[in-house]
Amino acid sequence: LYPVPVGMLVDGALEGLAALEAPRDIAIDVERPGVEVAVDPDRTRQALTNVLSNACRYSPPDSPVSLRARVEPGPDGEVVVLTVTDRGVGMTAE
């Protein structure tokens, strides 16, 4: 693990998504406070790309999919929260 800019993770996930999906409008709402997080950048990008891909795949056509990164207070200092929002059918509790 080493410090990685949040913007680089988001950009990498979007590039990965572009390689997987047919073009789709994605509403990007990214707060880029210039912070870094200590993560494995390849695995984090892969996980974020997978979530974005699922959101695009299971959302109605022409519906927005948004990706948001923000800094929030955590129990041991600030944390970065990445949120993907879509209008898909969701998952069952099972």
Image: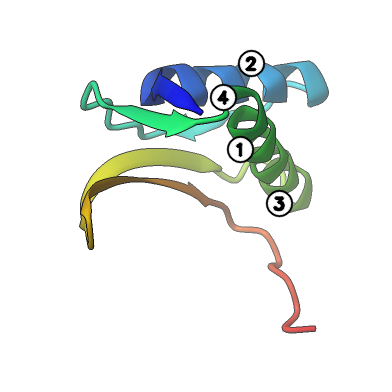
* Structural crowding at the residue carrying mark 2, measured as other residues with C-alpha within 10 Å and reported as few (<14), some (14–19) or many (≥20): few
The residue tagged 4 is: 41
Mark 1 and 2 residues: CB-CB less than 8 Å, in contact? Answer: no
Residue located farthest toward the front when viewing the structure as drawn: 1
Task: Please identify, in this view, whether the residue under mark 2 or under mark 3 is nearer the observer.
Answer: 2
- The amino acid type found where label 2 is placed reads Glu
The residue tagged 3 is: 60
The residue tagged 2 is: 15
Residue at mark 1 to residue at mark 3: CA–CA distance: 20 Å
Residue 67 in the image: above or below residue 16: below
Mark 4 and 2 residues: CB-CB less than 8 Å, in contact? Answer: no
- The amino acid type found where label 3 is placed reads Pro
Image point (66%, 45%), residue name: 51
Mark 2 and 3 residues: CB-CB less than 8 Å, in contact? Answer: no
* Structural crowding at the residue carrying mark 3, measured as other residues with C-alpha within 10 Å and reported as few (<14), some (14–19) or many (≥20): some
The residue tagged 1 is: 48
